[in-house]
Image (cartoon, rainbow, N blue to C red):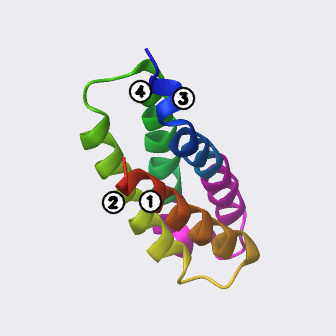
Amino acid sequence: MTAYHQYKVCIEACLRCAAICNHCASACAHNENSNMRADCVQLNMECAALCYATAELMSLGSMHIKEISKLCAIMCDECADECAKHDDEHCRETADCCRKCADECEVV
């Protein structure tokens, strides 16, 4: 089985995105206007969870990789759109990382 090697670039993009999304969720939750960042925190946590799951299922060689990666790309795009609304460095970094992950997931 060559699933890991076949999807290595996407797996690495998903793992990086999950880590950055977790960082962003934490930073937004500790922001002085955290009550206004609830959507950002929620989307970042959901995106991180889905990115971790996508990476894991790809490395396992799941027969649902195409469907999972498509959903991951959608979630990453939504998270990027939300983060792009905020002018914090961590949100800009997350938006960029999510867009890159979505690009990798879309070509699977």
Q: CA distance from mark 3 to mark 4?
A: 13 Å
Q: Which numbered dot is residue 102?
A: 1
Mark 2 is on which residue type? Answer: Ile
- The magenta-colored residue range is 19-42
Give 74 or 100, whichever is nearer the viewer. Answer: 100
- Give the amino acid at mark 1: Ala
Is disc 1 placed on a helix, strand or loop? helix
Looking at the image, which is closer to me, 102 or 3?
3
Please name the residue shown 55% across and 73% down the image.
83
Density class for disc 3 (Cα within 10 Å; few <14, some 14-19, many ≥20) is few
Of the residues tagged 1 and 2, which is closer to the observer?
1
Query: Which mark sits nearer the N-terminus, 2 or 3?
Result: 3
Which SS class for mark 2? Answer: helix
Quote the CA–CA distance across marks 2 and 4: 17 Å
Residue 51 rendering spot, x and y as whole percentages: 49, 43
Q: To which residue does mark 4 refer? A: 57
Between discs 1 and 2, the one toward the N terminus: 2
Judge whether 80 appears above or below 54 on screen.
below
Dot label at residue 5 = 3
Q: Report if the CB atoms under discs 3 and 4 are less than 8 Å apart.
A: no
Picture quadrant where residue 76 is located: bottom left
> In the rendered structure, which amino acid carries the disc numbered 3?
His
Dot 1 and dot 2 residues touching (CB under 8 Å) = yes
What residue is at 35 percent from the left and 45 percent from the top? 69
Q: Residue furthest top?
A: 1
Q: Which residue is mark 2?
A: 74
Q: Amino acid at mark 4?
A: Leu
Query: What is the number of callouts on the image?
Result: 4
Alpha-carbon span between mark 1 and mark 2: 7 Å
